[in-house]
Amino acid sequence: MIESIYQIGRAILEEGGGRRTVLESLADSPPADGKGKSYIAILKLDTARWKLGVELRELGGEKNTAARYLWLGNAPAAMDDQDRLTTNNLVYLVSQTIPNLLMEGRLDPASALYGKLKRLKDELYLDLGEPSELGTKGGGAYRRYRYFWDVGRLGIEGPGLEELRQEVREGLRPGNVPQKVARALQSHFRQEIPERGVLFTLELDGELLVDDPAYQEYLERSLIGRVFEGAREEGVCHLSGRKGPVTTDITRFRFKYYITDKVGFASGATKKGFGSNFALSREAYTALLVGERFVRRELGFVFAGARGYMIPDLYTVEVPKGLPGALQRVLRGIRSRTLFTLGRVQEEDLDEELEDFRREHLASGYMINLLFYRQKQAKFEVLGLIQDIPSYRLEELRSQGRRTGRLWEELYGSEARDLTLQQIYYLIPVRKSGDDMLTKEILAFYHALISGGLIDRKGLIDGFLELIRAYRFRNTAAYQVSAPEEGQEDLAVTRYVAQTSLLLAFLRDLDQLKEEEVDQGYLDCLSLDEEEKEYLRRLRYDKQQTALYLLGALVAEIANAQWRLGPEGRGGEKTILNKLNYQGMTLPRIQRLATELFDKLRQYRYTDRSGERRPLLQGRNESIFAQAQELLTEEWGSWRLTPPENVYYLLSGYSHRTFRAMTARERQTA
């Protein structure tokens, strides 16, 4: 994966440009409001009159992007000095940013920018005072909150210096002082500054400070140069293979390319780096930083309850030479197509221009990596990585999902539907822990699926039964699925079981389902209608699974009879379903259920075409019961299905028979 990110960064840098290009390549994604829009609020400070205005611009298009304002993110750690002149936090800009830039060793004191900022600090900033005067602790944290704008000088109503000092003496945290100043500005400019999706930058006397060469030199030195300052270490670069000055300090990278919090885990590791195995030249360091930012800004996606990045391997991609913006179009085309093959977007939603470009220039295919992560403040945690995926593999899975989707029409009689990788997410239980999804198991499933590994049927069915219980007993709040409407629990279970049967067929058709070989010659000896035989044949049921399927079909007959006992011949309670133990049922318990079904089939009646009321236990139902009982008896001594599997295959018969009845009713009323 690291090589792929390096390739992307190197390709971007090879397109040309100096320091500004490098910095713009490091741009971060801007925050967005609820409608997906992003803005920049330019604080226009006139020092001749000490007046402040705000110009709000919507970000978008090629010339008004977050990169144009050098939005590179804030300093990464919570306790770092904030020194960015474009930020998403107004508090930083009206307090510590300028004092931090004026600290020794940052800006060149001979530069014009240093002089402007020094005057600004001297004439616009208030000083909270020595910590001893306020009865509070000093140190680096206090230094960052000590200086802040005098909004009163700008003609803006806000808290005064003595008022703020007194509040600190009375217990206000010094860190809250700049927040009060920022709130005063936001209140004054509430018509210009939106509550969400906004960046802030400073314009001084008509000039954007981010355009100043001294600031850009500082940023480059801060992000890249400082890592190599005074570096005397010679070595071989891990990525380029060239010998020369190298660094092992990767603390500025957001992605963690190896473990950094356990320095004793391998030879050569230190708190800043891993010299024996991971040394970087300046060129590689810069390219990796640029590539990482591009991936974070342009190649992110959400899938299976987790955020992720899709990282193409550029060694497998032919980027057209001499075509403006070719690299970005290649990478965005790959992202767009990957979202389609994962089922995140539909075919009609694809960008036609990107699709045409992909077909013309990427017809030979490519490789991608899918990185899944969780971000909490400055902590970046990798949840999973699926490496070296050929593009044809994802296309293959999407095509197989279409073919499997046609089974819905064949087996259940209603309109065909695709089975996409995204839809599979809702078929396998993903538990919640607070606001977090526990995605480890589902990501392991996708890793096995995409990599072509075997997936155990028994393990899948254990999960299916877990979600069946969630639907049945309205306990979906603990999972990634939505609760069924009141009174629709049975329909939710019926639909879910049908969908999971398609998932098993999907995996079986891919030769990725770990299960026993089945000889289905026994089906020729059963007296069933052709639709039932086709279901059992297509889903590769063996004798044990078929016995349970047939019992489930009889449960559906009894449930339907109970449903018809409701008001106006519908809506009655299906009490027979209470006889099932949704945790799982042993074979002796299944046999006792069969005996209860026999009694219920004799008890409940249906109205035949002549209007006569007849017991359910006759004709086809009687034949089905006899065949189910015969299969149970025949397989008793060699039974291998688990208790959860027993319930699942019983419910498959219930689901199939119920869906067929529902489809038939819909056709009659259509």
Image (cartoon, rainbow, N blue to C red):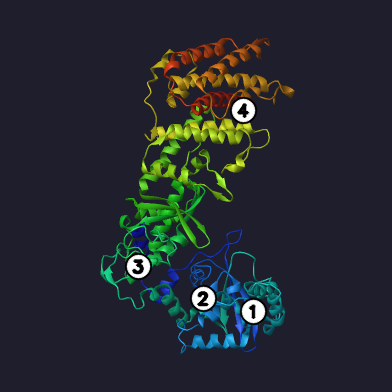
Looking at numbered disc 4 in the image, what kind of residue is underneath it? Answer: Glu
Taking depth in this image into account, of 487 and 269 the one nearest to the observer is 269
> Which residue is identified by label 3?
248
Q: Secondary structure at mark 1?
A: strand
Q: Secondary structure at mark 4?
A: helix
> Could you tell me which residue is drawn at 54 percent across and 85 percent down?
117
4 or 2: mark nearer the eye: 2
Work out how far the residue at label 3 is from the one at label 2, CA to CA, in angstroms: 24 Å
Q: Position of residue 374 (x, y in %)?
A: 49, 55
**Splitting the image into 4 quarters, where does residue 332 fall?**
bottom left
Looking at numbered disc 3 in the image, what kind of residue is underneath it? Answer: Thr
Q: Considering only vertical position in the picture, is 238 above or below 360?
A: below
Instruction: Report whether 444 appears left or right of 237.
Output: right
> Which residue is identified by label 1?
53
> Could you tell me which residue is drawn at 51 percent across and 83 percent down?
102
Q: Position of residue 570 (x, y in %)?
A: 70, 24
Taking depth in this image into account, of 298 and 128 the one nearest to the observer is 128
Work out how far the residue at label 2 is from the one at label 1, CA to CA, in angstroms: 22 Å
Q: Position of residue 386 (x, y in %)?
A: 39, 49
